[in-house]
Image (tube, rainbow, N blue to C red):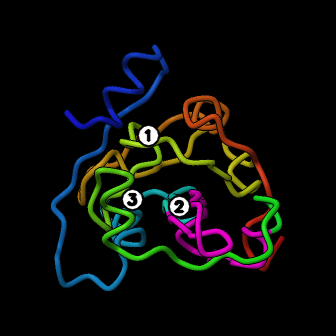
Amino acid sequence: MTPGINAAKKAGVAHRIHEYSHDAGHPSYGLEAAEKMAVPAQQVFKTLVVALDGKAMAVGIVPVTHQLSLKQMARAAGSKKAAMAAAADVQRSTGYVLGGVSPLGQKKRLPTFIDSSARDYARVYVSAGRRGLEIELNPDDLRRLTDGTFAGLTDND
């Protein structure tokens, strides 16, 4: 069990856990997850933590097939600037290691923004809290559990 899985269970949210053998040599955690679960990569979302205006942190959840637009992220968060947060800050704030950061069950709840493309699917996949472990759930449940906001977060939006 991870804090992310516990958060979904505690909230009574319908979800499924997918576990696979993580290959440390794979170049992309998210694309590896899609391949090993045999699901469309655009339904697998990565959890990224950014620093806003050099101070506060926030979470952006985007498809593994796309890059987070820092400009779009800053706009969604009502900030002037967003930059990727330092790995140590991510781990300290979320309680998770990079490549296994779940948007659920983080030590400190951060403002969370979910790419609006998530609403195109009945189910999406996000990290359940460690490499090789994904949780499948409805995007509206993901939004509710993270107290998140849907927004365009990629250059495609």
Q: Residue furthest front?
A: 55
Camera-side mark, 2 or 1: 1
Q: CA distance from mark 3 to mark 1?
A: 23 Å
Tell me the SS state at disc 3: loop
Residue on which disc 2 sits: 40
Which residue is found at the position 82% from the left and 60% from the top? 78
Q: Is residue 64 magenta?
A: yes
Task: Tell which circle, 3 or 1, labels the residue nearer the N-terminal end.
Answer: 3
Tag 1: Cα neighbours inside 10 Å, few (<14), some, or many (≥20)?
Answer: many
Question: Does residue 61 appear in the picture of this structure?
Answer: no
- The answer to whether residue 16 is above or below residue 119 is above
- At label 3, the amino acid type is Ala
Q: Which residues are magenta?
A: 48-74
Question: Does residue 155 appear in the picture of this structure?
Answer: yes
User: What numbered label is drawn on residue 38?
Assistant: 3
- The answer to whether residue 96 is above or below residue 4 is below
Tell me where residue 109 appears, x and y as whole percent: 50, 41
- At label 1, the amino acid type is Leu
- The answer to whether residue 27 is above or below residue 135 is below
Q: Is residue 89 magenta?
A: no
Tell me where residue 114 appears, x and y as whole percent: 67, 52
Q: CA distance from mark 2 to mark 3?
A: 7 Å
Which residue is found at the position 57% from the left and 40% from the top? 123
- The answer to whether residue 157 is above or below residue 116 is below
Q: Which one is nearer the viewer's eye here, 143 or 57?
A: 57
Tell me the SS state at disc 1: loop
- At label 2, the amino acid type is Pro
Q: CA distance from mark 2 to mark 1?
A: 22 Å
Name the side, left or right, on which 99 lies relative to 146.
Answer: left
Residue on which disc 1 sits: 104
